[in-house]
Image (cartoon, rainbow, N blue to C red):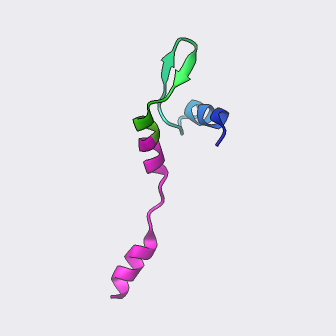
Amino acid sequence: MHAQAIYDLRTDGRGPSGIRVGREIRYRVSDVVHWLDGLHEPDFSLTVREVQR
């Protein structure tokens, strides 16, 4: 993913929260990981297998 895409997503309210340092935006690794975890789609194949048993 391009760095600009992260900045654009943040501006739209759909990206990780950032911290302004002077004129630049910086991201905590933990904030990016949390954001990525929120994008994770559930694995429905596990649920289907459990129901079939």
Q: Is residue 44 above or below residue 9?
A: below
- Reply yes or no: does residue 46 show up in magenta: yes
Q: Residue furthest top?
A: 22
Q: In this picture, is 22 found above or below 44?
A: above
Side of 10 relative to 42 (left or right): right
Quarter occupied by the N terminus: top right
- The number of discs equals 0
Task: Kindly identify the residue that appears in the image at 44 percent across and 49 percent down.
Answer: 38
Q: Residue at x 57, y 18 (%)?
A: 24
Q: Position of residue 22 (x, y in %)?
A: 53, 11
Please tell me which residue is depicted at 47% across the width and 55% down the height of the picture: 40
The answer to whether residue 51 is above or below residue 40 is below
Q: Position of residue 32 (x, y in %)?
A: 47, 38
Tell me residue 50's x, y (percent). Answer: 34, 80
The foreground one among 14 and 29 is 29
What residue is drawn where x is 60% and y is 31%? 7
Residue 2, located in which quarter of the rendered image? top right
Determine which quarter of the picture holds residue 34: top left
In percent of width and height, residue 53 lies at 33, 88
The stretch of residues the image draws in magenta is 33-53
Q: Single out the residue that lies furthest toward the bottom.
A: 53
Residue lying farthest front? 29
In front here: 30 or 48?
Answer: 30
Q: Is residue 20 magenta?
A: no
Relative to 35, 12 lies left or right = right
Task: Say which quarter of the image contains residue 12.
Answer: top right
Principal SS element in the magenta part? helix
